[in-house]
Image (cartoon, rainbow, N blue to C red):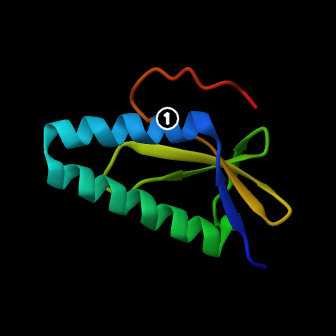
Amino acid sequence: MIYKIVIIEEAKADYKKSLLWYKNVHPKLAIRFNDSFKRSLAIIKIDPLLFQIRYDNIRVVFLKTFPYAIHYSIYENRIVIKSIFHTSRESELNVF
């Protein structure tokens, strides 16, 4: 099955905030973060069932070399990215 990835606005804001933080630390670090994020999305798109359900039909994939997790759900042929957040910070994540 071919899946389409949809990123909700809150998750886009999470991503942009994190990318900007890394860019302020060092531009090359932002590039590495972006590449890691894109690789994770590619893996999810190829096999979204690869990652286990953690809670309320939400699956979680952790970025390599960065302390971030992508939370997503699968609806028919759509993968909906619901949040992207730092794994060691307090989260304002709503339970979906």
Residue on which disc 1 sits: 13
Q: Farthest bottom residue?
A: 1
- At x 36%, y 43%, the residue is 67
Report the front residue among 59 and 18: 18
Q: Is residue 2 left or right of residue 38?
A: right
At a point 56% along the width and 20% down the height, the residue shown is: 92
Q: In the image shown, does 35 or 71 lie closer to the viewer?
A: 35
Q: Is residue 84 visible?
A: no
* Amino acid at dot 1: Ala
Left or right: 57 as drawn, with respect to 38: right
Q: Residue at x 54, y 47 (%)?
A: 70
Indicate the secondary structure of the residue bearing disc 1.
Answer: helix
Question: Which quadrant of the structure image shows residue 58?
Answer: top right
Residue sitting at the far right:
76
Residue 93 in the image: x percent, y percent? 60, 26
* Local crowd size for mark 1, using a 10 Å CA cut-off: few (<14), some (14–19), many (≥20): some
Q: Quadrant of the C terminus?
A: top right
- In this orientation, does residue 91 appear? yes
